[in-house]
Amino acid sequence: MKLLWILLPFSLLAQEAFISYAEYGEMLYENPRGVSCLECHGKYGEGKIILEYDDVKGKQVLKGADIRKTTLDKMVYALNTYHKVMPRYYLTDKEIKAIYDYIGLKNSLN
Ligand code: HEC
């Protein structure tokens, strides 16, 4: 019995260390060791206006792509290449898959 009281706090701590797969994906989407995907792709991956400005051609809108229907292969490719606007990330395939699944889940709940 005494041993139980000694071990109990540790088992509680251990439980808190576990997050669900969806939370893991959410965490990576919002904080992917760099600029948050959310800033440009929005809450559901629907794409968000990053910047609006006027130039000689008139009003310009810079928007993050809608990534709700992007395939996993495309996402892996997009995250491992350089773009004009989107930053280059250094995420593992497992992390990218978690982001991909998170976006899918987020949209299936809508
Ligand atoms: C600074 C804004 C910005 C951030 C931050 C950003 N993106 Fe993007 N992303 C874009 C823009 C703009 C495009 C489309 C044009 C391009 O390729 O640069 C794009 C394209 C993509 C594409 C390709 C879409 C397609 O169908 O070809 C994917 C997938 C993607 N982003 C996922 C992500 C994920 C996941 C993150 C976070 C790890 C992220 N992006 C962070 C701006 C951003």
Image: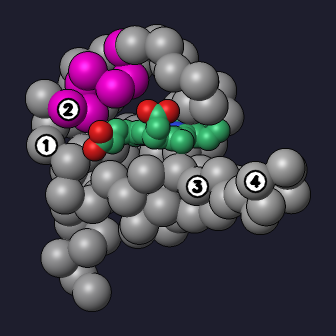
Q: Residue at coordinates 36% horizontally, 14% vertically from top-left? A: 80
- The residue carrying mark 1 is 71
Q: Which part of the image, by quadrant, shows the C terminus? A: bottom left
- Cα distance in 3D space between marks 1 and 2: 5 Å
Task: Find out whether the residues at labels 1 and 2 contact each other: C-beta distance under 8 Å.
Answer: yes
User: In what element is the residue under mark 1?
Assistant: loop
Can residue 77 be found in the magenta stretch? Answer: yes
Residue 48 visible somewhere in the drawing: yes
Tell me: residue 66, above or below residue 55. Answer: below
- Mark 2 burial class by Cα count in 10 Å: few <14, some 14-19, many 20+: few
Magenta residues (range): 74-80
Mark 1 C-beta closer than 8 Å to ligand 1: no
Q: Mark 2 and ligand 1: say if the CB distance to the nearest ligand atom is below 8 Å.
A: yes
The residue where tag 4 is placed is 57
Q: Looking at numbered disc 2 in the image, what kind of residue is underneath it?
A: Lys
Front disc: 3 or 4? 4
Write down the residue under mark 3. 63
Label at residue 88: none
Label 2 vs 4, first from the N-terminus: 4
Crowding near the residue tagged with mark 3, few <14, some 14–19, many ≥20 C-alpha atoms within 10 Å: some
- Dot 2 lies on which element? helix
* Circle 4: residue type: Lys
Taking the spot 43% from the left edge, 51% from the top edge, the residue there is 65
Residue for badge 2: 74
Mark pair 2, 4: CA separation: 31 Å
State the residue in front, 26 or 14.
Answer: 26
Task: Determine whether, in the image, residue 3 is placed left or right of residue 86.
Answer: left
